[in-house]
């Protein structure tokens, strides 16, 4: 997510919506709580992006829905090898 936030910020987007298949990640990022120290530095960096002058929305996506996106991405990657 951190790398994705950096990329969309550099490209000038002002509204971003992330869909994650981990409920824990979605709720942790949507909360202001720090939680455990594991990953707290990365979490702070991500939250700094949230505080910038733009709109970031985090949504939980069930893994079954994400599996479809992964399959389509793999299909696209495989078909580009044959061109």
Image (tube, rainbow, N blue to C red):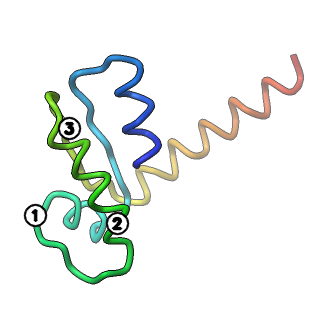
x, y (%) of residue 55?
A: 15, 32
Could you tell me which secondary element the residue under label 1 belongs to? loop
Outermost residue, bottom side: 36
- The tag on residue 41 is 2
Could you give the CA–CA distance between mark 2 and mark 1, rounded to whole angstroms? 14 Å
Instruction: Left or right? Give the position of 55 relative to 5.
Output: left
Q: Quadrant of residue 33?
A: bottom left
Q: Residue at x 51, y 42 (%)?
A: 69
Which residue is at the front of the view, 27 or 74? Answer: 27
Could you tell me which secondary element the residue under label 2 belongs to? helix
Instruction: Left or right? Give the position of 7 relative to 76.
Output: left
Q: Residue at x 31, y 81 (%)?
A: 37
Could you give the CA–CA distance between mark 3 and mark 2, rounded to whole angstroms? 19 Å
Q: What residue does disc 1 label? A: 32
Query: Closer to the observer: label 2 or label 1?
Result: 2
Return the disc, 2 or 1, that comes first in the chain's sequence.
Answer: 1
Q: Residues within 10 Å of mark 1 (few under 14, many from 20)?
A: few
Looking at the picture, does residue 25 appear above or below residue 48? below
x, y (%) of residue 2?
A: 40, 48
Which residue is at the front of the view, 24 or 77? Answer: 24
Q: Residue at x 15, y 57 (%)?
A: 30
Return the disc, 3 or 1, that comes first in the chain's sequence.
Answer: 1
Q: What residue does disc 3 label? A: 56
- The tag on residue 73 is none
Which residue is at the front of the view, 14 or 83? Answer: 14
């Amino acid at each position: 997510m951190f790398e994705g936030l950096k990329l969309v910020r550099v490209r000038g987007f002002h509204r971003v919506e992330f869909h994650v298949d981990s409920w824990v990640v979605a709720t942790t990022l949507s909360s202001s709580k720090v939680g455990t120290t594991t990953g707290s530095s990365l979490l702070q960096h991500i939250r700094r992006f949230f505080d910038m002058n733009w709109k970031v929305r985090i949504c939980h996506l069930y893994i079954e829905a994400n599996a479809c996106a992964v399959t389509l991405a793999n299909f696209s990657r495989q078909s580009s090898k044959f061109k």
